[in-house]
Image (tube, helix red, strand yellow):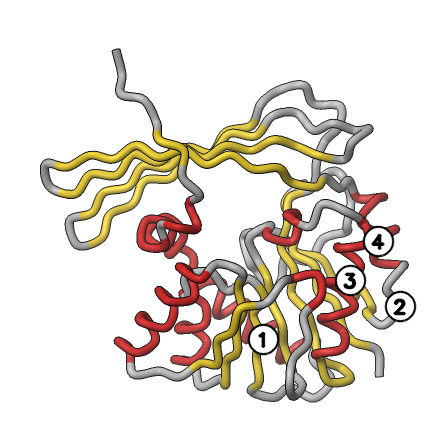
Amino acid sequence: MPASFTELDWYESPLYYDIIFEEDTDLEGAFLEMALARYGSAPGKRILEPACGSGRLLEEMAARGYKVTGFDLSPEMLEFAKRRLDASGLEASLSQKRMESFKMRGRFDLAHCLVSTFKYLLTEEHARGHLKSVARALVPGGIYVLGMHLSDYDDPRRNRERWVAERDGTHVVCNIQGWPPNRTLRTERVRSRMVVKEGERERRMETNWTFRTYNARQLRSLLRSVPELEHVATYDFSYQLDGERPLSDNQLDCVLLLRKRE
């Protein structure tokens, strides 16, 4: 009989989370840099990352010469990010804030949130509050790069992703499963199961959470309710700047380019 999984918020395990998601960091950093150059009206060097997590992109963009600021709700993630940047000899401004109602000192040329964290905002009010908070934080002509997965309400299947990665003798297998979305409640259940091996030690951890769902029509409606931000382009998670595509239900992985109106 296989060992059972222990319920644990994976944001309390920053190292394992970081190992799983670091693979595309260089690609994401290059995309952010090129997107700012193409779509920012007055490209500068000030970057804000809401829900900055383990700090992998803070480190990446700081290493590219940007002045980076990040916030997160998780104290464990913030502490991990601080140690990571200190070890690299890089600087970042870090703080604990909520996505739906944050206020920042100063203004930024680019903000980004790439890994569907936006969908943790479970009400339209909180989603709109987040976008308005981002708009307040951007300079006129500044851009927000927002990545998320759309939902197919007609698909009855569970969706699954599997990630395998290793760093310094720590081997992590992560299986993420999503249940069919509930069209009425605008929610979907998601579960992560991680098996971590460090030498002879094995840990099995499970995290369960709920996302808010969007199809293309619902997302366009939300964006129209925040006139401070103009939707200027849509990409997917291949992060190819020559791969612009329409915002539609034919492509469930989407990366939005939003620009603050001047």
Residue 212, given in percent of the width and then of the height, sits at 70, 41
Distance between the Cα atoms at labels 1 and 3? 17 Å
Image point 26% across, 39% down: which residue?
196
Mark 1 crowdedness (10 Å alpha carbons): few <14, some 14-19, many ≥20:
many
Which of disc 4 and disc 2 is earlier in sequence? 4
Distance between the Cα atoms at labels 1 and 4? 22 Å
Residue 227, given in percent of the width and then of the height, sits at 89, 68
Q: Are marks 2 and 1 in contact (CB under 8 Å)?
A: no
Distance between the Cα atoms at labels 2 and 4? 10 Å
User: Callout 4, which amino acid?
Assistant: Leu
Residue 210, given in percent of the width and then of the height, sits at 62, 37
Which of disc 1 and disc 2 is earlier in sequence? 1
Q: Which residue is mark 2?
A: 227
Q: Is residue 16 above or below residue 145?
A: above
Q: Which residue is mark 4?
A: 222
Mark 4 crowdedness (10 Å alpha carbons): few <14, some 14-19, many ≥20:
some
Q: Which residue is mark 1?
A: 48
Q: Are marks 1 and 3 in contact (CB under 8 Å)?
A: no
Distance between the Cα atoms at labels 2 and 1? 20 Å
Q: Which residue is mark 3?
A: 129
Distance between the Cα atoms at labels 3 and 4? 11 Å
Image point 56% across, 33% down: which residue?
190
Q: Secondary structure at mark 4?
A: helix
| Of labels 3 and 4, the one closer to you | 3
